[in-house]
Image (spheres, grey):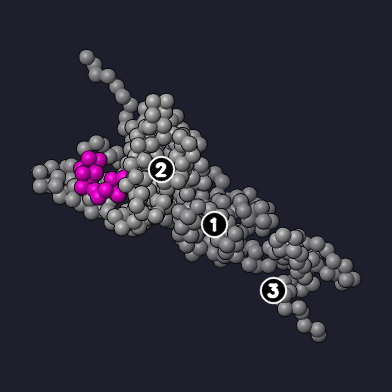
Amino acid sequence: MRPRNIENRDLPPGVVRRKRKSGKVWVGYYYRDSTGKEIALGSDLSKARLKWAELEAKEKPVDLTTMNGIFDRYEHDVIPKKGERTQKDNLAELKQLRPTFDGAPIDSITPANIAGYRDARSAKVRANREIALLSHVFNMAREWGLTERENPCQGIRKNKETPPDYYANAVVWDAVYGMAEPELREAMDLGYLTGQRPADVIIMRSDDTEGDYFLVTQGKTGLKLRILMRTEVGENSLGQLIREISERNAHHPSKYLLINKHGKRMTKGMLRLRWDKAREKAQQKAIEQGDPMLAAKIGGFQFRDIRPKAASEIVDIGDASLLLGHSKQEITKRVYRRIGATAKPSK
């Protein structure tokens, strides 16, 4: 028997791969029947294998119908297109899901199985995130033609979540700020004035400007923002801060706003090290002054709490939601506004 072309050895019997170049390489799959006629199967290998199985009246390939293969494809095709932090979270979530679902045929999974997974997980909040990812995996599998069943995650009750409510008041802020190195103070100010996530703050650059605006692209969502640096009367607090940082860094070649005294840009590790050091000093000072309650509050302060502090201290919730990049004000109100409404005394 004549051996198959080496390029087609990974394909089912009777299927061939065709390639064309027109700026970029196009790949298509074709099924050659008993008469020699070729039938187009499309450019998606998984869908091509499914169509081949139908034409040959065979069972669908096992690796396309069990969750193991579907998870593999999702990890290969979908996750890399997400933000860096989301990729990391999704990979951790898949790691939790695989032991339970890897060997299951996709059409065998029921809502009861999903609910059982939810109830068995000790990390209740993480279980919600994992089920949300599993739901997206099912939706993608439907798009890929790997199942025609309804998504079994739909309608599954989520575990109750209590949003974080830590709020760093002025006393706590000043305590840490007072012990911070210059570049950490600048990081805190940038985080507060822009309302952005720590990962976005440390990559801000002096050339992220356009006229009167400071340009931000959120790493998690890809959302683009233009934050005002000037008003009719001149520079605002953000504009002044960026100018002062740029002037201080002028003798260094780096365009990053947050750099150390040697001109090296701030990394996550550097930020964490400086934050822990300043917080520890602030705690120790509070203890020495006989205020263990303040020391405890300082100990709970994390850099990521600066974002909700900003959201809480902007009077108009619409402005707060816009600065944080939320599509719905309800998210800002429920998760990030951590101080109560302003009320007047009885007299």
Instruction: Decide whether residue 273 is among the magenta residues.
Output: no
The amino acid on which the numbered mark 1 sits, given as a three-letter code, is Ile
Can residue 41 be seen here? The reply is: yes
Q: Where is mark 3, residue-wise?
A: 10
Q: Which residues are magenta?
A: 173-186
Q: Nearer the viewer, residue 228 or 100?
A: 228
Residue at the (36%, 54%) spot, across then down: 252
Which of the marked residues, 1 or 2, is nearer the chain's N terminus?
Answer: 1
Which of the marked residues, 2 or 3, is nearer the chain's N terminus?
Answer: 3
Q: CA distance from mark 3 to mark 1?
A: 24 Å
Query: Where is the N terminus found, in terms of image quarters?
Result: bottom right
Q: Where is mark 2, residue-wise?
A: 196
Q: Where is mark 1, residue-wise?
A: 79
**Numbered disc 3: secondary structure:** loop
Q: Is residue 10 left or right of residue 187?
A: right
Q: Is residue 80 above or below residue 190?
A: below
Q: Is residue 246 above or below residue 345?
A: below
Which of the marked residues, 3 or 1, is nearer the chain's N terminus?
Answer: 3
The amino acid on which the numbered mark 2 sits, given as a three-letter code, is Gln
Across and down, in percent, residue 323 comes to: 43, 36
Q: CA distance from mark 1 to mark 2?
A: 23 Å
Across and down, in percent, residue 86 comes to: 48, 53
Q: Main secondary structure of the magenta part?
A: helix
Q: CA distance from mark 2 to mark 3?
A: 47 Å
Q: Nearer the viewer, residue 221 or 52?
A: 221
Across and down, in percent, residue 66 comes to: 61, 64
